[in-house]
Image: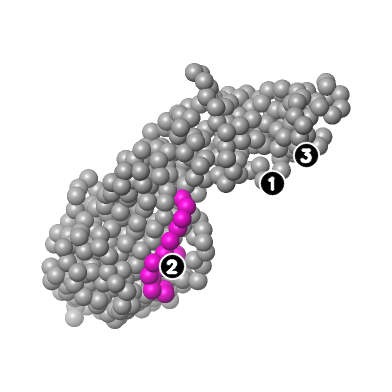
Amino acid sequence: MTNVFVKFLLFLLFLFPKILYSQYFRIDTSILSIDFVEYHFINEKNHGIYIKNSFIYGEKNTIGIFKYAGTFKVLPRNGIIISTGSVTDAEGPNKSNSSTENYFPGDTDITQLINNKSFDATLLEFDFMSLTDSVSFSFVFASEEYPEYVNRGVSDAFAFIVSNKNTGKKINIAKLPNSDVPITIDQINSDKNAQYFINNSYINFANTNKSKEEYLFYYENNQLFQFDGFTKLIETGLKIVPFEMYHFKIVIADVGDRKFDSWVLLKGNSFSSCGKKTNPSKKELNNYFKHFENDTVPIFSNQNEIKISTSIYFDYNSYDLKNDSYRILNHVTNIMFNSDYKLIIHGFADKKGDEKYNLELSQNRADKVKEYLIKSGINEFRIKSIGMGEFDSQNDTISRKVEFILQ
């Protein structure tokens, strides 16, 4: 053992407590609420993607939430982690082979992709709609199969299967960027597509010529992660038809045998609508509200404008927004974010009281809605608010409202 290596070992022993304190990788399987996919996967600043009908299939503890802090930033800060075994087995230090055989069946899409029998599948599925023509997200693939079982017929794999619910056409987007290379241990390792691979298995540093940073890089990762190898962060996505419903299936499985686990780590809040804006038609808006609003939303159109008759209602003699109004307002906000439409807001009042006062009240109601949209990030020059005065209806509640016109 060289003197340089001995000195470095002493340096690591001195640094070890500091590393443990400031760097971490933790997994939580206790917070899988009904909306956890929406909360942890959809871009929180993105207004153009919606999901529904989330579904998880897998043995207990095969899916969870991770948090990471590391000097070398090899993983996202947080996100969703899915495994062929127990997700918590991914936590380091890397000192044993992780293998949880959950005896769940495999998956037909994985079997077809790899042309080999699959086992221990875990699935995360949901329906989604994008308001632009592209979606994207980022992920990392990790496995205990590295490096011993590369090209040994047990290449664990995962797939991101996106299906158009109208046409049934589906595609796997779990591939290397700008290629048709699927994400498996046989396709990404130290010898093949190595630019995407990070080795976390044993390295004999006494017999290698490594820099101090390379030593620290390996040491930190080896302390934090159990898996023997993993990919760099990879971004994927696809072009889609906006305002159509799609089905998203994330599946990971053991291939060839049930031994030695693999994981896919989805970058937190990375699923986003990132394509070209489009001005939706009446038909597209009908499809949008049909899927993401409980009540029927009347929509009318002529040559130059679309009227959305979903209404924001107010209490008597008030222009304060009611709590149940924000859901509709957020729909309108998101349509505006992802289109070039200009918006006219018509405010109304009932016929009680003085006509002049009611005109002023209707203007205040329209202005209040405009104010909310501006605070939500819509340019004020795209919005016009007009008080329409009294609305003649036998139901006074329906008369106290605002309506929206897209131009």
Main secondary structure found in the magenta portion: strand
- 231 vs 200: above or below: above
**What secondary structure is found at the residue carrying circle 2?**
strand
Residue 279 x/y as whole percent: 45, 29
Nearer-N-terminus badge (1/3): 3
- The span picked out in magenta is 51-71
The residue pinned by badge 3 equals: 315
- Calculate the distance from the C-alpha at mark 2 to the C-alpha at mark 1: 32 Å
Mark whose residue sits in front, 1 or 3: 3
Q: Please tell me whether residue 67 belongs to the stretch shown in magenta.
A: yes
The residue positioned 81% from the left and 27% from the top of the image is 351
Q: Which residue is mark 2?
A: 64
- Does residue 155 appear to the left or right of 137 in the view shown? left
| Whether residue 20 can be seen here | yes
Disc 3 crowd, CA 10 A, few/some/many (<14, 14-19, 20+): few
Residue 269, horizontal then vertical, whole percent: 45, 53
